[in-house]
Amino acid sequence: MSKEGHFRDALRKWIADTSSKASFEQVRDDTPLFRTGILKSVQVTDLILYIEELTERSVNVEQIKPGVFRDIDSIYQHFFAQDHA
Amino acid sequence: MATLAELTTRLCRISQEHFIDPFSRLDWPASIERNQWFMSPDLVSLHGTRHWNALDEQQRQLLSFFELINFFSINIHGERMLIEGLAKRLYREHTETVSPYLHHFLDEENKHMFYFGRFCNQYAGKVYPEKRFSIVREYADGEEEFLFFARVMLFEEMVDIFNRRMAKDQQLVPLSREINWLHHFEEARHLAFGRRLVEELFENHADHWQQEVRQRIADELAQFLDATWKDYFNPEVYKDAGLDDAYAVRREVLGDPAVRLRRKKLCDRSARTLVKLGLLTEESIS
């Protein structure tokens, strides 16, 4: 599996493990995470810490723009893609 | 029980009579040795776990230093959110009764941020950054107002448990003890005000909320309480204290039986007003 696929699946697994509303198979790369209630606003902190662990980089919350956590595609593009361009 | 208006008048009088100037009240040594206790050992996030048992006394004290920096950082971020929210609510139609006290509330929270910020910057050279990020959504009538003050109350109830314990702990460095006491002294009034206001907002709005809205509010507050508890487990603290695999340590200790027991005690106490209102239950916050 490519690094990109590895990170996307790691995020998918984390989301499925954290949420009671969607399984690993149900969370597609373009599935809205918050609009559909799969994740709640208060779970963003745990998601940010998991992204830090995967990227081994601190996340600066002050620089995050709305929409960054919309779906796995958006999360990957914002936090991971620069490492694999 | 006093009405909100009566309580507001009484709290304003006490705030005026017990005005504290934090700029002259505290003694700030130029530097502080870190081989002392800064946070009570049994309040340190790793206490009771195998990671705590593996540390010697000096390592535990160093960890307690960074845990106190994290505790003060949590306070700074929470109080910044509070100040933003309170300022927005001054002199609005529905806050006419309480606006006189909101002035004291704002003034006191600003002073708290001053001493928390100074301690962090002077002795650690930093404030740990916030990791919270709000997703905007729509609210039912009264929902946003109720959620704001209920979140504030949950946040301050938990902080106050730590403050009260550390204010009395003679093994702590004097400045830590004094800051915790000062904060508790003023937060006791904020909590009395917050509990009464939350009760009144609930009485005014709850009957108009459909079951779906009520459940959404209950779920969000239970999750907020959980997120607030987890803020006390900061991987940056563990890295600064020299622990390996900081994120894995956090994940592990959050599930540790000793930590789960501590969580239950703190969360039950923090949520008691919302449990009394019938919005949360011991099960929903477990």
Image (cartoon, rainbow, N blue to C red):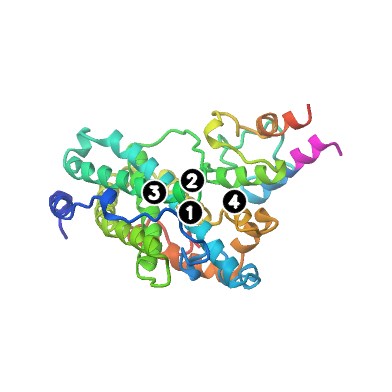
Reply yes or no: does residue B19 show up in magenta.
no
Q: Nearer the viewer, residue B121 or B52?
A: B121
Callout 2: helix, strand or loop?
A: loop
Return the residue at label 2: B127
| Mark whose residue sits in front, 4 or 3 | 4
Q: Earlier in the sequence, mark 2 or mark 3?
A: 2
Vertical placement of residue B34 versus B194, above or below: below
Return the residue at label 4: B236
Dot 4 alpha-carbon crowd within 10 angstroms: few under 14, some 14 to 19, many 20 or more: some
The quarter holding residue B280 reads bottom left
Callout 4: helix, strand or loop?
A: helix
In this rendering, do the residues under marks 2 and 3 share a single chain? yes
Q: Which residues are magenta?
A: A1-9
Return the residue at label 1: B69
Quarter occupied by the N terminus of chain B: bottom left
Q: Chain of mark 1?
A: B
Query: Which three-letter amino acid code belongs to the residue tagged 1?
Result: Ile
- Identify the mark at residue B151; answer none if there is no mark: 3
